[in-house]
Image (spheres, rainbow, N blue to C red):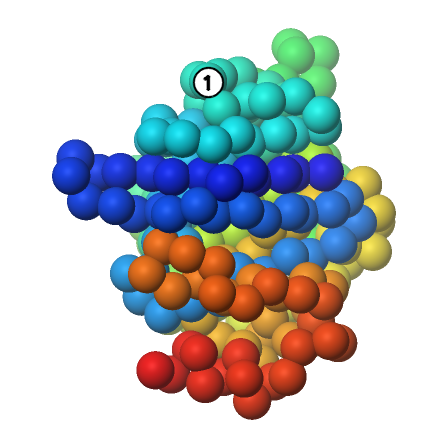
Amino acid sequence: MLSVEAVDLHYGAAIALRGVSLRAETGAVTCLLGRNGVGKTSLLRAIVGAHPLTRGAIRWEGEDIARLPIYDRARRGIAIVPQGRDIFPLLTVRENLETGFAVLPRGSRRVPEDVFALFPVLGTMLNRRGGDLSGGQQQQLAIARALVMRPRLLLMDEPTEGIQPSIIKDIGRVIATLRARGDMAILLVEQYFDFAHLLAQHIAVMDRGEIVLDGRNEELDPQDVRRRLSV
């Protein structure tokens, strides 16, 4: 389980997160919803170690990892699919996937076959440069690159942003498949309630750096969630 406990985060004098607490359980999708600029990406950056906390704790598999560097968290099975994808445009698809090898023991440095089962199109494009792929294909590559790391905690920052509807459906099916395996906790950051509602077991809504609504998907009032996203 991932447990974020009363986390504060500052950028200089600006407060990005204020008393944020959140959990993500193995075998489930937890979705963090919110409008632009409310702190969702800042929370993911705090979890992976890209920005130090001002206060609070982040526990993963029972260990407080808040002071560990990024690479140590990655070695503990934490992977992120960043907003904007951040693939390497001049590297091939194969080389982009192989960047996930860095945190793996030498004997495990291979692309799992199930990556190509989840994203068949990538198997046909291994020698194409990442920058030559469409936006949807680049998003699939970014997810596949994270899966190469064999994560036990997968963080996904708005994977549907700027993606055509057919690819959004494919990404939704991949997330559902990963959830069904039961060996991974998934924390999904989104703006769109409908996508989250289809996939998540747990939903939290963030506003102005705070969690303002938190509960099981089936227990929340959809209209209340939508209202908080549109204010």
Left or right of 55, for residue 180: right
Task: Please give the name of the residue rendered at 33% of the width and 38% of the height, measured from the top-left corner.
Answer: 9
Circle 1: element type: loop
Q: In this orientation, does residue 85 appear?
A: no
Quadrant where the N terminus is found in the figure? top right
Q: In this orientation, does residue 51 appear?
A: yes
69 over 26 or under it: above or below: above
Q: Position of residue 224 (x, y in %)?
A: 54, 84
Task: Please give the name of the residue rendered at 49% of the width and 24% of the height, measured from the top-left corner.
Answer: 66
Q: Nearer the viewer, residue 44 or 147?
A: 44
Structural crowding at the residue carrying mark 1, measured as other residues with C-alpha within 10 Å and reported as few (<14), some (14–19) or many (≥20): few
- Mark 1 sits on what residue? 67
Name, please, the residue furthest toward the bottom: 223
Name, please, the residue furthest toward the top: 106
Task: Please give the name of the residue rendered at 69% of the width and 57% of the height, measured from the top-left corner.
Answer: 29
Left or right of 9, for residue 140: right
Task: Please give the name of the residue rendered at 31% of the width and 66% of the height, measured from the top-left corner.
Answer: 36
Quadrant where the C terminus is found in the figure? bottom left
Q: Amino acid at mark 1?
A: Arg
Q: How many marks?
A: 1
Q: Quadrant of residue 176?
A: bottom right
228 over 122 or under it: above or below: below
Q: Position of residue 169 (x, y in %)?
A: 61, 74
Q: Position of residue 156 (x, y in %)?
A: 52, 51
175 over 224 or under it: above or below: above
Left or right of 29, for residue 11: left
Q: Position of residue 94 (x, y in %)?
A: 51, 36
Left or right of 231, for residue 106: right
